[in-house]
Image (cartoon, helix red, strand yellow):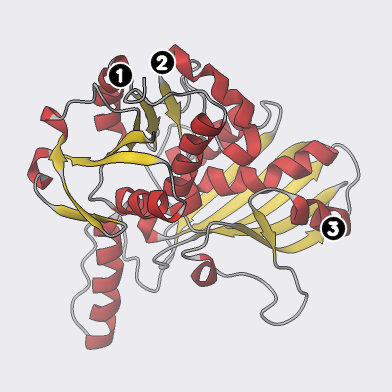
Amino acid sequence: MGYSVAIVGATGNVGREILEILDDRGFPVDDVFAVASRRSQGTEVSFGDRTLKVKALETFDFAGVDICLMSAGGAVSKEWSPKIAAQGCVVIDNSSAWRMDADVPLIVPEVNADAIEGFRKRNIIANPNCSTAQLVVALKPLHDHARITRCVVSTYQSVSGAGKDAMDELFNQTRAVFVADPIEAEHFTKRIAFNAIPHIDSFLDDGFTKEEWKMTVETKKIIDPKIKLVATCVRVPVFVSHSEAVHLEFEQPITADEARDILREAPGCLVVDKREDGGYVTPYEAAGDDATFISRIREDPTVENGLALWVVSDNLRKGAALNAVQIAELLVNRGLIDSRAAA
């Protein structure tokens, strides 16, 4: 007997990716429901060789659903996740709404799977920010070996992290450049085509953006509150996959060769690190893949026990949809959830 699963936000980039990954990985489902806002009701989305008609969130009954994969944004999640959870359905949320709630586990299965045990307090599990997810996959095995004390990270984040409208804006602006049409910035604060914007999410009083704050506090919650982390988050004209330049300081000595060997054996990591032309992974190559790719591993001579590395991953997959499905698999594989239809 399989599970009943609902995807809220099924018409968005991440929602469609979730449907594809559930099918690709053979998740044990008997019933799959595509759910979105009332304006998307009746829209068709694909699940394997099936076509699902989208149902309206406002009228959908979650009483018989086992798992809800929520990808409809923070405001929707704040309102609906507790209501859905109260009906006995476990909510796995992709937004920032619940990540820092002390009663909600923030999970990356390769990193802190045991923390999932606390999900019953609210019946909600949080997915981390896309830029955090790939970072902690790379950091955790190194932290276990030599204890990271400080992390300085600069991100190069694709426009898909801001949704379909942002992807359309990059496409339209790029085309406008070549045909000499006027360039209009609607979703982004400045032109994104052939540019880089050092601003993701809103600004905070200390001058950092909320995206940069998320990376700091989420890494502390997932791995270790003692890690000092500072981030600069930049939007770049790439459609899919986030890249990160990461500089680490450790409590104990660690060499580049040791780090390379550790990461080669680490779950979710794929090391591509040849010191030659093209011996590294770019965002284009990471798109559509489940791995967190790590390249350019080298010792940092400017600090004691320092390393520098390049981390790339598909933000729609490991940064959102894949991680959410992996959390659902964790619930099933550890026997933490039963199919209510079977019961």
Q: Residue 61 or 163: which is nearer the viewer? A: 61
Q: Quadrant of the C terminus?
A: top left
Secondary structure at badge 3 equals helix
Give the number of the disc on residue 82.
1
- The answer for how far apart the CA atoms under marks 3 and 2 are is 42 Å
- The answer for how far apart the CA atoms under marks 3 and 1 are is 46 Å
User: Are the two marked residues, 3 and 2, in contact with CB atoms closer than 8 angstroms?
Assistant: no
Between circles 3 and 2, the one closer to the viewer is 2
Most distant residue in the top direction? 121
Please report whichever mark, 2 or 1, sits nearer to the chain's N-terminal start: 1
Between circles 3 and 1, the one closer to the viewer is 1
Most distant residue in the right direction? 253
Residue 8 in view of the camera: no
User: Are the two marked residues, 3 and 1, in contact with CB atoms closer than 8 angstroms?
Assistant: no
The three-letter amino acid code for the residue at tag 3 is Ala
The three-letter amino acid code for the residue at tag 1 is Pro
Task: List the residue tagged with mark 3.
Answer: 256
Image location of residue 249, percent across then percent down: 79, 44
Q: Tell whether 277 sits left or right of 215.
A: right
User: Are the two marked residues, 2 and 1, in contact with CB atoms closer than 8 angstroms?
Assistant: yes
Q: Against 285, is 202 above or below?
A: above
Q: Tell whether 296 sits left or right of 95.
A: right
- The answer for how far apart the CA atoms under marks 2 and 1 are is 8 Å
Please report whichever mark, 3 or 1, sits nearer to the chain's N-terminal start: 1
Residue 54 in view of the camera: yes
Residue 20: quarter of image = bottom left
Please report whichever mark, 3 or 2, sits nearer to the chain's N-terminal start: 2
Give the number of the disc on residue 122.
2
Secondary structure at badge 2 equals loop
Q: Against 77, is 266 above or below?
A: below
Give the number of the disc on residue 113.
none
